[in-house]
Image: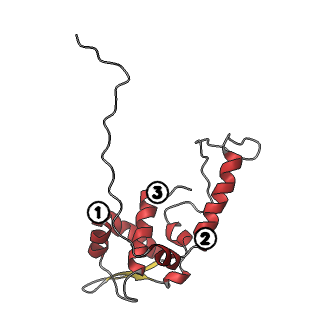
Amino acid sequence: MWLSGTSQNALRAVLHLADQPAGRPVPVDEIADSLDCPRNYLSKTLHALTRAGVLRSTRGPGGGFRLVDPPARLTLARVVAPFEPVGERRCLVGRAECGGTRPCPAHNHWSRIATVVETYFSSTTVADLLRDGGPPGRPAARSPARPRRSRVSQRPK
């Protein structure tokens, strides 16, 4: 199970909210600035988490988002569920059908690893991550893209 960018941002936003004083609604602008994430994109992600019952939102001045449950009761699986199909395993090599009588070359090894990952997400809480890794921060800076080398050698004319 590889996490989409939206799932990663959802996790980061939930970690940020869990690291705030209990019950304080946090405005989307504050979360977006902290995570270095586009506000409109993050707002849609936070509203999806609200519809899923992970967050509560309050409108108006002094409004914002906060967790519905304490971080110790909120699993990572619940946070990513609105964005990742629950229980759906994608074939590691991209086959439409994989498993049973038609496993791909990676199926047997990958299915064991996927089970471990699913167990991790369903048994790890937001509090576990905060305790183990400290407060969330901005994502690591991406290294600049290297120029692609042409496959055709260019000879001087």
**Between discs 3 and 1, the one toward the N terminus:** 3
Occupied quadrant, residue 136:
bottom left
User: Foreground: 37 or 97?
Assistant: 37
Secondary structure beneath disc 2?
helix
Q: Which residue is mark 2?
A: 122
**Between discs 2 and 1, the one toward the N terminus:** 1
Give the spatial CA distance, label 3 vs label 1: 16 Å
User: Foreground: 102 or 44?
Assistant: 102
Question: Where residue 35 sits: x, y (%)?
Answer: 32, 68
Number of marks in picture: 3
> Dividing the image into 4 quarters, which one contains the N terminus?
bottom right
Q: Which residue is mark 1?
A: 38
Count neighbours of disc 3 (C-alpha within 10 A) and say few if under 14, some if 14 to 19, many if 20 or more: few
Secondary structure beneath disc 3?
loop
Report whether 123 appears left or right of 63.
Answer: right
Question: Where residue 81 sits: x, y (%)?
Answer: 53, 67
Report the amino acid beneath label 1: Pro
Report whether 59 appears left or right of 73.
Answer: left
Give the residue drawn at x 35%, y 69%. Answer: 137
Report the amino acid beneath label 3: Ser
Residue 56 makes an appearance in the image:
no
Question: Where residue 115 sits: x, y (%)?
Answer: 66, 60
Q: Which residue is mark 3?
A: 4
Count neighbours of disc 1 (C-alpha within 10 A) and say few if under 14, some if 14 to 19, many if 20 or more: few
Residue 13 makes an appearance in the image:
yes
**Between discs 2 and 3, the one toward the N terminus:** 3
Report the amino acid beneath label 2: Ser
